[in-house]
Amino acid sequence: MVTPVDVGLVLAGLLLAFVGAAVSVYTVTLAGFLVGAGTGYVFAPSALGLLGAEGLVATAGIVVVVGLIGAFLAYAGLSFAVMGIGGIVGAFIARFAVAPIYAAGTWETAAVTVVGLVAGALFGLIATKLTLVFASGFIGSAFATRSLTLAEFQTAQETLSIDPLIFDMLSPLFVAVFVLGVLFQLGLFRFGYVTKLVAVIPGARRWTAGEESSS
């Protein structure tokens, strides 16, 4: 059964995948909310246990609050947020790459994942625009193609592990949406449409990847 949450995640994913880097301030804020909400959902049972509360409403409250905190932190520190987003994507790619080689939970897997996280964060520091294009395409495609759904987050919540969130990054549908999204975003920059979008969208001039001439 398709729920409003499922539809919302797919729509948010499509926006991230195809126009994410063009309106960076919104992309980073939305990504911050999604990361925060996902983190809140995974650790909600532990938090509710400490607070002595339970129930769907309480869980939803934690998800929304942590999501808003993530969005605020991302908006307040956009450059650092890009590094964080790059790090998360780098860690996921590294974890997927070593999955056929090392078993989950081994020190080798952890070490490679950390290396991916650091590499992604450094890439976000030195190539902000490209990081936003690829990271928004990656995260957006994962949600748009339902490679990541609420079910995976529920499993991660039960196991307190990120392994359920590692999806098949070679899936034809994911690859197709990712490639199309990245190419579309690069085209927006190449043909000057980013400047037009920033001019008409409130708040987008605060910070946009299009202003990163060094990338």
Image (cartoon, rainbow, N blue to C red):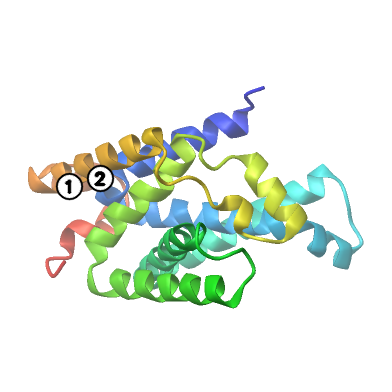
Q: Disc 2 designates what residue? A: 182
The answer to whether residue 40 of the structure is visible from this angle is yes
Residue placed at 71% from the left, 46% from the top? 154
Instruction: State left or right for residue 188 relative to residue 170.
Output: left
Query: In this rendering, is residue 208 above or below 169?
Result: below
Name the quadrant of the C terminus. Answer: bottom left
Q: Disc 1 designates what residue? A: 186
Query: In this rendering, is residue 150 above or below 208?
Result: above
Three-letter amino acid code at the position of disc 2: Val
Three-letter amino acid code at the position of disc 1: Leu
Q: Position of residue 26 (x, y in %)?
A: 38, 51
Name the quadrant of the N terminus. Answer: top right
**Cβ atoms at labels 1 and 2 below 8 Å apart:** yes
Q: Residues within 10 Å of mark 1 (few under 14, many from 20)?
A: many
Q: Position of residue 98 (x, y in %)?
A: 47, 63
Local SS, label 1:
helix
Q: Depth check: give the residue in front, 38 or 164.
A: 164
Q: Depth check: give the residue in front, 74 or 17.
A: 17
Q: How many marks?
A: 2
Separation of marks 1 and 2 at Cα, in angstroms: 6 Å
Q: Position of residue 24 (x, y in %)?
A: 31, 55
